[in-house]
């Protein structure tokens, strides 16, 4: 068995974080989302993976290499033009000589998710479905006795609570079906159209309903939920130095050469990378991931957030339900306001964020006493002067005074 993982997309709805990396490389518990998927595949004894890459592909290839470090053999194929999921799968044709898995690179899964579909395999095609109360924006599956009768893409009315999870088991004959697939109204070749064509031909397409992990990372703030879920399984590991007077409760992982200064209070699950300096008197609360080479000043409070690598946070700051990109320098008394049920506009479309502070891109310099209003974002390479309150999204390369 081989696996094809679709990882060519840009991730426009995760801007500004995807200005410098593809969505599959955004961190969940200090590891790229794609790494979690690859490890889940490897734990099911699938040892050969074909990664379909495109946008920012060099960063993916540099990180994963030939896959040996992750217990698999990785090959790469390229989808430079984003022409749909069926087109992406077709790029792997020359590497496939047997039945194979197909997975989306932006859905967080675990080993049990893959095990579910492998155990339930039946028919010409097997697809994985998950039950969701809210199905808006998803393809839903209609089935009878475990056999798929129709896949409806983004229906306006609720006709099923079973969402197509984008995990499939195919035989090599799927490539012949892809060649017969017509272009959709959106100008793409969709694998769901291929499967619907197979159903109309009278061939068996079976469905496996899974209760295992499946989190669709559509927006940047979805990574906060994914981060929280993965950290729930964290094991305590203290490789760094914890000074006398620091208190650590619950499952906390601290990387090599990191220092937790006196007076710190950390409540897990929390993961802190290598070569970090935390505190003194800093409070880090659950569902927080702090990347490598990060320095946190005194009397800072961080909760339910993702801080990437190479960040400096000044003393007296407050960060909550936020994602801070790499190589940011943040001055003292920085604060994120947090809002619920926010409507965030992206490319003229409103998107809902249940609970969000801010999302900040890479390589920014923020001076002292800056407040970011809930849901407002900062791009890359921005400079913000002291005492500013951010009331609107800041585009890349801006100077805010």
Image (cartoon, rainbow, N blue to C red):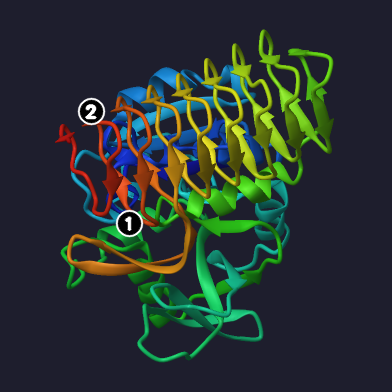
Where residue 313 appears, as percent x and y from the top left, is 47, 26
Residue drawn at point x = 16 percent, y = 64 percent: 187
**Does residue 164 appear in this view?**
yes
The local secondary structure at tag 2 comes to loop
Front residue of 306 and 383: 383
Q: Position of residue 166 (x, y in %)?
A: 48, 60
Given contact means CB atoms under 8 Å apart, are the residues at marks 2 and 1 in contact?
no
> Which residue is depicted at the point 28% across and 48% down?
390
Q: Which residue is mark 1?
A: 86
Instruction: Categorize mark 1 by other alpha carbons within 10 Å: few (<14), some (14-19), many (20+).
Output: many
Q: Is residue 371 above or below residue 163?
A: above
In the rendered structure, the answer to whether residue 347 lies left or right of residue 362 reads: left
Quadrant of the rendered image containing residue 347: bottom left
- State the residue position of label 2: 381
Q: Earlier in the sequence, mark 2 or mark 1?
A: 1
Residue 29 appears in the picture as rendered = no
């Amino acid at each position: 068995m081989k696996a094809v993982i679709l990882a060519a997309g840009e991730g426009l709805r995760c801007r500004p974080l995807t200005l410098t990396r593809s969505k599959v490389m955004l961190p969940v518990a200090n590891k790229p989302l794609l790494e979690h998927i690859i490890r889940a595949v490897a734990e099911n004894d699938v040892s050969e993976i074909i990664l379909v890459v495109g946008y920012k592909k060099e960063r993916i290839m540099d990180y994963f290499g030939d896959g040996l470090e992750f217990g698999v053999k990785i090959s790469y194929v390229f989808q430079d033009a984003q022409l749909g999921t069926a087109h992406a799968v077709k790029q792997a044709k020359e590497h496939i000589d047997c039945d194979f898995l197909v997975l989306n690179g932006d859905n967080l899964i675990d080993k049990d998710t893959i095990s579910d579909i492998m155990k339930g395999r039946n028919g010409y095609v097997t697809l994985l479905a998950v039950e969701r109360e809210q199905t808006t924006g998803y393809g839903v599956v209609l089935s009878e006795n475990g056999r798929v009768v129709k896949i409806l893409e983004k229906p306006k009315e609720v006709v099923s609570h079973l969402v197509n999870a984008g995990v499939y088991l195919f035989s090599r004959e799927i490539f012949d079906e892809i060649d017969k697939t017509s272009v959709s109204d959106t100008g793409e070749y969709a694998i769901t159209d291929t499967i619907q064509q197979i159903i109309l031909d009278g061939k068996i397409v079976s469905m496996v309903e899974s209760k295992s992990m499946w989190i669709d990372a559509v927006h940047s703030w979805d990574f906060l939920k994914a981060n929280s879920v993965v950290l729930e399984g964290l094991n305590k590991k203290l490789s760094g130095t914890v000074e006398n007077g620091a208190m650590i409760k619950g499952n906390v992982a601290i990387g090599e050469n990191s220092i937790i200064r006196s007076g710190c209070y950390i409540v897990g699950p929390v993961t802190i990378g290598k070569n970090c300096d935390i505190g003194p008197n800093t409070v880090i609360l659950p569902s927080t991931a702090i990347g490598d080479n990060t320095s946190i000043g005194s009397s800072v409070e961080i909760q339910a957030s993702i801080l990437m690598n190479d960040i400096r946070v000044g003393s007296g700051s407050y960060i909550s339900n936020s994602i801070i990109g790499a190589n940011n320098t943040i001055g003292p008394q920085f604060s994120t306001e947090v809002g619920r049920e926010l409507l965030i506009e992206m490319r003229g479309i409103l998107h809902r964020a249940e609970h969000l502070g801010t999302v900040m891109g890479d390589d920014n310099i923020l001076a002292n006493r800056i407040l970011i209003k809930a849901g407002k974002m900062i791009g890359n390479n921005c400079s913000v002067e002291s005492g500013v309150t951010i009331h609107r999204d800041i585009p890349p390369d801006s100077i805010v005074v």
